[in-house]
Image: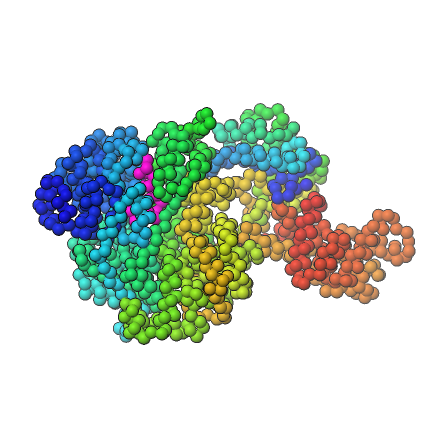
Amino acid sequence: MAFQLFSEKLKHLLKQRGFSEPTLPQKMGIPSILEGKNVLIIAPTGSGKTEVACLPLFDLIHTKQLAPISMLYINPLRSLSRDLLDRLVWWADKLDLEIAVRHGDVSTRERAAQAEMPPHILITTPETLGAMLTGKRMREHLKNVKYVVVDEIHELVESKRGIQMSLLLERLREFAGDFQRIGLSATVGSPDKVAAFLGDNINIIRAELEKRYEISVENPRPGIKDKAISDDLFIGPETTARLRRLHDLITSHKSVLAFTNTRETAEILSSRLRSLNKELKQTVHHGSLAKEKRIKSEQEFKQRILKSLIATSSLELGIDIGSIDLVVQYLSPRQVTRLIQRVGRSGHRVGEVSKGIILSGAEDLFESTAVANNAMEGRLEQVKMHSMALDVLASQIVGIVFDKNQANPDEIYNIVKRSYPYKDIEKKDVEEIIKFLETLRILWINPAEGSYSVRRRRRAFPYYFENLSTIPMKKQYRVISIIENEPIGFLDEEFVAEHGQPGEKFVVSGRAWRIIQTDAQKVMVEPVEDIESAIPAWEGELIPVPFRIAQDVGKLRRRILHMSEAEAGEKYKINSHAAEEMKELMRNQSKFMIPDEKNFLMETYKDFIIMHACLGSMVNDTLGRYIAAILTEETGVSVNVKADPYRIILQTMVKPEKIVEILLSGGGNGGIEETLTRAIERSTLFKYRFIHVARRFGIISKQADYDRINMSKIIMQYANTPCYKETLREIFLDKMDIPLAETVLQAIAKNEITIKVMEGLSPLGELGISHQFGDVLKPRMPEKEIFNAFRRRLMLTRVRILCMNCGDYNLIRTVKDMEDQPECPKCSSRMIAVARRGQVNISGIVKKKHKKKDLSAEELKVFATIRRSADLVIVYGKKAVITLAGHGIGPETAARILARLHTTREKLLRDILEAEKQFVRTKKYWK
Amino acid sequence: MFVLNEPAMVVRDYLVIADVHIGITKALKDAGVMLPSQVEKLAEKINALKRASNARNLIILGDFKHEIPRISWQERMEIPQILSLLAFEKIIITKGNHDGNIEKIVKDKRVKIRKSFAVGGYIFTHGHRRIKAGKKTVVMGHNHPHVKFVDDIGTSYVNPCWVVGRSLKHRLVLVPAFNELCGATVVNGKDAFLGPIARNMDRKNARVYLLDGTYIGRIKNIMVK
């Protein structure tokens, strides 16, 4: 038994506290830790992981009498530090160990005291570790570190914070030598990757097996009562039915945690629940609330004063909120891992089952069902790591230079390479960053024989400390309606950056608004009716739906039609109304066609083309942007594109067959990435992300005055630098899935996936179009607009028209007003010449010629030219007039152009434009 | 004459550029953006234009430096530095509104600082003050002219351009800014032209060309909102 391995003193303490039986994670984890192994312990939130790591380590520090600081406990959440301290301080006291917390909010005096009298155990955050490493005295104490515990490592592994911590641990290793590493993780999809991220030779201990999940999906049937309530509460009967069901669930359980996907939904739910029942003790909990308010509601919930919390992902992490008997997920959780982590908050006692209910709407029923079923089968998403993040690398290279005072590229490279996210890095990558940091005047390169060494410059300190936090400071904008002059909600900075231009429409607080003006703090708006073309403002808060879930949705669409409601309810754990709704939707859809994971449907409606493809958020976003990029490059017109997990919606004039053609010819040759790179560079998303990456490179300061900066021009200056590359890398990782999109294109090319083109708007199409547009892709040059301007100018050109027969018809006319086959109104001759407006005397020359008078050499030349132009007009009519009106185009050039016999006016105009450009290349522009 | 795809022109053996704004990086740094020094890049670009055109001399149409009204330490360093990198026999700077006291930091013997400078039928100047041009074509900077396009969806694009037109007595050419980082005057929008010379231009009938030589049309026909 695990506890038997402890020292007598600790065994005694355990007895004192009434710990007789170890929990499963304790049973499995403690022996390995005592043996000195590196371990990753995977167990659900709240199953006593902290003690698994701390009890044996405290015991070791106590028995071996290790010097402080012997152990670091790294937790990503600063607000959890106090909680942890409260939990651990009793044990530490009894074992005569000092324990303390250190993070950004700890007072300077306290921190100074820690440097003087270091504790054995220090609870800290990754960022504070970064700061401590630069302190002279702290660094001395850190040399004693023998154990490092990384808590909530699943949170860190997918973020830039985590990548930074990985490098920080390698820097620490330079001082402290090898230390024992212990990772604590909630249930994740790829334990191997998380283990590798923690370090070498990690034993994975999965202590989650005893936990079982019981998750059902409900779509409550609206009753007559709901209709009445819905009128009172200003929400639809469907929403009311869900709300009432949530209310009933809360009242029939002891403690209910309800999760929503966005802050806005959490707010609305809580306020409507209050209108429904004032007595019900519940409140909201999300990241935008004041810290004090959050802490207060956490405590009240724990003490059962509040029966329910309506929360966003702010409560996913291990905040201790006591025992919960039910977790409700409001609308689809979108990802399996998220659902498991949320539902895992309930049933904390050993052997208890975690119970969760998804309250779903008609639109996301299929998705909720697919996620729930995957969760119960334990199929979680793979971990996605920011490997090779260059901005984090830059600030940590500066950190290494601090550590060493002076470092050469080999030293730096060797430290960086030890960190798992950078295992594939090459020396030249490191050197590129060093050189880039030199141009930014952060580092100083000191040439030495055959190599060089690197030192810091004055900017290095502010740069390093400003960038310890890799979490972008996200500003929020107040939205104010000019009609009522009242705030109606908030918008995220990223959203404003992408869509903040006057005239853009978006949805917030359940209505559509048009932007009148945006300034540094607020967005002024007016209400509009047109909800069809407005973008939902919470777009950015939604996590992507994975490929596999979307594929399962496709299968489910097909299968549900052939099942009875009872069968479906039994198999998929859905209530009967949900099964009814799903069948009903598919019955209506089958009048068109049911798009599933292998059969895509492309339908046209107004100027929309909707391609139904069950490929998930990222693949559809990738394909959508790819199609838009190709269309933009070929036509020179900007294309509106929006993707959701099940559709790609384009707003364009091209035929759907053209889109099919693009999809058929796209795959396999790596062309997607190249095309997307060109397109992404021009997008507003790139601009926004660039700003954040540039901040982490110290290029843009946190106080930058954006009114005085033209960001596009700054970005141009940084083309192909590490800052630019990092922006692209980040976008590709966060928003897209290029390899999978390539695979899909290959399947389309091999006909393993079929695409059917149809007209009209099917029920699934309607669901997609009711919320609108994402990014607008700009062509590199506004070709079409340039061309239109050219056409307008050419048609408005005034030319001199002269009858070669009589010479009396001689006047200036505008090209667009010319007849298709001009004739002389005086003598009906078709010998009509076109000349420059300024050639006043040509009529005289023609008449002189008719009278058989001798012409001078000069006059002969002019005559020949206009004769030739008249020849062209006889043959080609107005087309000849248009061509001759071109800038610097004489009859010779015109003849060459016209001989190509253009089928359309546009083709002719394009040739004229080319000829004009040719002319200015050889002549002065303006004569 | 105009150099294809570049904001530069060649008149006889003079290469002509406008609005170089050395030291703009300092202003941007104050606004919160760090940029590496532009000097070497700009110098290389100018020298490449020299090689391609066989020009022997350089005319800079003013606003060679950026800071107003003083001289920043950066300009003290970078102005002599860029001049030393430029391989011309003669360099004429027609002084602009950003060039106050520039004489104090220019010691290079090849450099002449003038209000305006005539070559053949052309007279070169910055454009923030009136000059006596007679019937000569005035070639000036100061405006950083750009043309704006708006497409069907409402997306807009702004591209640098040349503007060629007339005022009462003479022809007039507005030269696009050489430094890509400085601001813009949208010629086919509401922006007022800068300086007395450009303001006297028959703006409506002035012609707009993109740097690749595309003739866009007269301003009156291409106005956008």
- What residue sits 50% from the left and 40% below the top? A717
Task: Give the percent coordinates (x, y) of residue A35.
Answer: 20, 41
Q: Left of A900 or right of it: where is A593?
A: left
Position above or below: A20 against A127: below
Comparing A402 with B190, the one in front is A402
**In front of the other: A830 or B43:** B43
Q: What residue do we see at 48% from left, 59% from top?
A: A746
Main SS of residues in magenta: helix
Residue A327 appears in the rendering: no
- Report x, y in % for residue A905: 66, 61
Q: In which quarter of the image is the N terminus of chain B?
A: top right
Estimate the x, y position of residue A430 in percent, counting from the top left.
Answer: 42, 37
Residue A20 seen in render: yes
Instruction: Please identify the quarter of the rendering in which residue A542 is found.
Output: bottom left
Rendered location of residue A768, percent (x, y): 42, 65
Q: In this view, does A80 lie above or below A570?
A: above
Extent of the magenta region: A153-171
Residue A219 colored magenta? no
In-front residue for pair A492/B201? A492
Quadrant hosting residue A178: top left
The residue sitting at 17% across, 56% down in the picture is: A349
Question: Residue at the location (40% across, 32% down)?
Answer: A410
